[in-house]
Structure formats: structure tokens, C-alpha cells
């Protein structure tokens, strides 16, 4: 556990806000997010992730008693001091690089520095072809059967703690979320994408273990804030 020795259990989380280091957020809004009752702040994004903008958010979130996690996307922007580190493996990428090669590089360089009690692998399935992460990691558009297969593999082959259904930027299919949840017994189901109000949050939380709210923080702050209470 990180410097703050915050007590947190990911398997008890329901809601997290994901902050993009490349986007600006005011101190007032940051305070409201951190004190909203959300379970954690995840710092993560796809483009323009630098050590400077990651550290800036870390220091600012650190003023509050809330777990702060880094979702690693750039090897050069990893820093100690977070409570937790999430490492995505993109299950529906067509390139092995995003499934294991960059992780292999990371292990060769940093194995001794990684505290595995603070690190969780995430099996990502990226559903929105317009999402930056989809393009960057050369994903294929999965059928429902594909997605259910990936979820099964996440739990039974890779024994991943988290399966992350990622619609980043658009609201996904709650029926698919329900079907995935039925595949999973041990692996937690994270859902992220397009949640911008209470009703959307509630709907996805019916079957996802954790919902992730990102973009609407920057587009409709008041409504994004209300997604916390909607799922508690
Ligand atoms: C992005 O899953 C998160 O990685 C949240 O998605 O930005 O669409 O809310 P949105």
C-alpha cells in the first residue's frame, strides 16, 4: 500500500472517477470529486501522458483521503507514490505487443521495483472503434461471442483480477454487461464508457462491479458528480 496507508479494497469498490492527466481540472472541481464519496480516483489516459501531468494530479489528489491509483499507459510516466497501479492487457488487440510484449519489457526493466500487492492487471476489451485506445492498440471489433470468450479467458486462463469492458466515449450495451457478469465468478467486472448521468450509472452498476466515469467530468461536471450517489 502507498505512502498514505489508506485502507482500500478494490473488491468493495462501486464507483471510480478516472482523471485524464492531459485535461485540465480546477481545484474546486477536484475537491468535489475527491469528497464525493467515490471509492477512488484513477489517473489514466491515452494521449499526452507525461510524468509532469501525472505528478501534478497525484500531488493535487493527495490532499484528500481517497485512494489514488495510476493506470499505466506510458512507461516513462510511472512514478512511485500512488496507492495502486493498474496495468492493462488489451485482450482484443490484434498485436501481441499490447497483450504482453510491453509488459515483458516492463518486467525486465522494473521487476525489482514493482510491489505486486499494489499492482493489478486488467484484461481490457475495447469496444468503441473511435476510441483513441482502440486505434492505438490496433483492436479488432469483437462480437458478443468474442467478448464472452475474452471474459472467460480473463478469469479461467489468465486469472486476472479485473475484466474491463471499455467503451470509452460512448455508452455501451447493458445487456452485454449482464452477460459478461454471468461468465465471471472471481474476476471483477469494471465498466467504463459514456456514463454521464444517474440513470446511466445505475443501469451499468446493476451488473458491473465497478463503474468508471471519465469524460463527463470534463463535459458536464454536475451530472458526473451525481453518478456517485446513484450507485450507493
Ligand atoms: C475511460 O472507461 C473510462 O477509460 C471512462 O469512459 O471517459 O467515456 O466516461 P468515459
Image: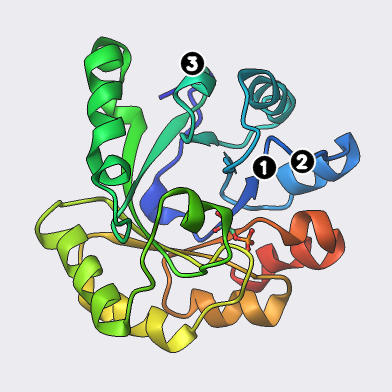
Question: How many numbered marks have been drawn onto this rendered protein structure?
Answer: 3
Q: How crowded is mark 3: few (under 14 residues within 10 Å), some or many (20 or more)?
A: few
Q: Is residue 89 above or below residue 223?
A: above
Looking at the picture, how far across and down is residue 200, in whole percent? 64, 79
Secondary structure found at label 2: loop
Which residue in the protein does label 3 denote? 80
How far is mark 3 from mark 2, CA to CA? 21 Å
Task: Give the residue at mark 2.
Answer: 23
Q: Do the residues labelled 2 and 1 touch (CB within 8 Å)?
A: yes
Q: Does the residue labelled 1 lie within 8 Å of ligand 1?
A: yes
Report which residue position mark 1 lands on: 20
Is 75 situated above or below 184? Answer: above
Spot occupied by residue 210 in the image (x, y as percentages of width and height): 47, 62
Please tell me how crowded label 1 is: few (under 14), some (14-19), or many (20+) other residues with Cα within 10 Å. many
Taking 38 as reference, is 223 left or right? right
Q: Residues within 10 Å of mark 2 (few under 14, many from 20)?
A: few
Q: Quadrant location of residue 150? A: bottom left
Q: Which callout, 3 or 2, points at the residue further toward the start of the chain?
A: 2
Q: Is the C-beta separation of discs 3 and 2 under 8 Å?
A: no
Q: Is residue 129 above or below residue 124?
A: below
Amino acid at each position: 500500500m502507498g505512502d498514505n496507508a489508506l485502507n482500500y479494497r478494490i473488491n468493495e469498490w462501486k464507483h471510480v472517477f478516472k482523471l485524464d492527466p492531459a485535461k485540465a481540472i480546477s481545484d474546486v472541481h477536484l475537491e468535489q470529486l475527491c469528497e464525493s464519496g467515490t471509492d477512488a480516483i484513477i489517473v489514466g489516459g491515452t494521449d499526452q501522458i507525461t510524468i509532469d501531468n501525472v505528478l501534478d494530479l497525484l500531488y493535487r489528489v493527495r490532499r484528500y483521503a481517497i485512494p489514488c491509483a495510476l493506470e499505466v499507459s506510458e512507461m516513462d510516466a510511472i512514478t512511485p507514490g500512488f496507492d495502486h497501479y493498474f496495468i492493462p492487457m488489451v485482450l482484443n488487440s490484434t498485436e501481441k505487443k499490447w497483450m504482453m510484449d510491453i509488459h515483458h519489457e516492463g518486467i525486465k526493466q522494473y521487476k525489482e521495483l514493482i510491489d505486486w500487492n499494489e499492482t493489478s492487471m486488467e484484461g481490457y476489451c475495447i469496444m468503441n472503434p473511435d476510441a483513441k485506445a482502440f486505434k492505438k492498440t490496433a483492436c479488432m471489433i469483437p462480437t458478443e461471442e468474442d467478448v464472452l470468450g475474452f471474459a472467460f479467458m480473463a478469469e479461467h486462463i489468465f486469472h486476472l483480477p479485473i475484466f474491463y469492458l471499455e467503451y470509452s466515449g460512448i455508452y455501451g450495451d447493458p445487456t452485454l454487461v449482464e452477460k459478461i457478469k454471468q461468465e465471471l465468478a472471481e474476476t471483477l467486472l469494471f465498466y467504463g464508457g459514456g456514463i454521464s448521468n444517474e440513470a446511466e450509472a445505475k443501469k451499468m452498476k446493476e451488473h458491473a462491479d465497478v463503474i468508471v466515469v471519465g469524460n463527463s467530468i470534463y463535459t458536464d461536471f454536475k451530472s458526473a458528480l451525481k453518478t456517485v450517489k446513484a450507485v450507493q
